Amino acid sequence: MSRPAAVLWDMDGTLIDTEPLWGKATYELGELLGRPLTPEVRAKTIGGSFPNTLNVVAEWAGYELRDGDLERYRTWMFDRMRELFATGIELNPGIGGVLESLARRGTPMFVCTNTERVLADPCIDAIGRDFFAGTITGDEVSHAKPAPDMYLEAARLAGAAPGECLVVEDSWHGMSAAAAAKCAVLGLADEVPAGVLKFAPDNFVGAGASDVDDWFSAARQA
């Protein structure tokens, strides 16, 4: 096939530039647990679920998690992210034009994000909820990325085989999840897993649906 049956978008870092905000809150979480993070430790949390983030930070800090800590620190993190999101959410360069072109053509699109629903919804609204046939968040699947569940569910909702879908991802967790689901994957990163096409985000600027078709064909051969 020459065009994707559906395009499945990661959100943070892919559609919108929120990773610096998540980074700020994650570094603050490290301080809260008693040991400042290094960039290398922070990188292990990118694209992961909050339980993954908390486990990584707690292990680094030598902090033994106790009953209730997951809920307590999730509340702290989500409250902090709401504060940071209130400063403004912007689309990454070129993304708006690509979304508009795909929507005009009628290509179904889904947001697939490890961010939980309560925080994802304001971001989806800022992007433009009407662009998407559906949205799936990390608290709505049995296993968040890097498990393939989210992308398998999006393909099912699109009525397509995973290999007929194009995924756009920027984190190792997300790229691994999409590759495990057997989707065609564009990886917006310097290093990508096997089966993922390394892709420069600058390519989105001025692009449209026909370019997406070309990228899909190339990604299927990765």
Image (cartoon, rainbow, N blue to C red):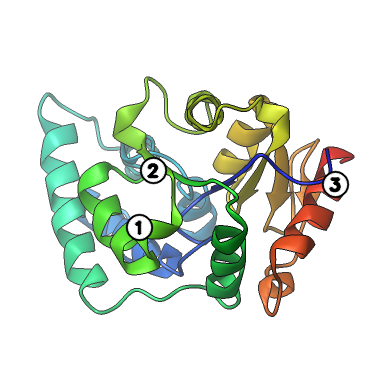
- For image coordinates 54% across by 54% down, the residue present is 40
Badge 3 amino acid: Ser
Q: Residue at x 40, y 66 (%)?
A: 18
Q: Residue at x 57, y 78 (%)?
A: 93
Residue situated in front as seen by the camera: 97 or 62: 97
Label 3 vs label 1: CA separation?
A: 27 Å
Q: Is residue 178 above or below residue 131?
A: above
Q: Amino acid at mark 1?
A: Arg
Disc 1 secondary structure class: helix
**Numbered label attached to residue 135:** 2
Report the amino acid beneath label 2.
Answer: Thr
**Which residue is depicted at the point 31% across and 53% down?**
35
Say above or below: 190 vs 114. below
- Look at mark 1 in the image and give the residue it sits on: 129
Among numbered discs 2 and 3, the one appearing first in the sequence:
2
Q: Which mark is residue 64?
A: none
- The numbered mark at residue 217 is 3
Marks 1 and 2 in Cβ contact (< 8 Å): yes
Would residue 42 appear left or right of 177 to someone viewing this image?
Answer: left
The answer to whether residue 34 is visible is no
Which comes before the other along the chain, label 3 or label 1? Answer: 1
Q: Nearer the viewer, residue 172 or 214?
A: 214
* Alpha carbons under labels 1 and 2: distance apart: 9 Å
How many other residues sit within 10 Å of disc 1, few (<14), some (14-19) or many (≥20)?
some
Q: Nearer the viewer, residue 207 or 145?
A: 207
Kindly indicate the quadrant of the structure image that contains residue 101: bottom right
Q: Give x and y (percent) for residue 145.
A: 49, 33
Please tell me how crowded label 3 is: few (under 14), some (14-19), or many (20+) other residues with Cα within 10 Å.
Answer: some
Quarter of the figure with residue 21: bottom left
* Percent of width and height locating residue 77: 21, 52
Tell me which numbered mark, 1 or 2, is placed earlier along the sequence: 1
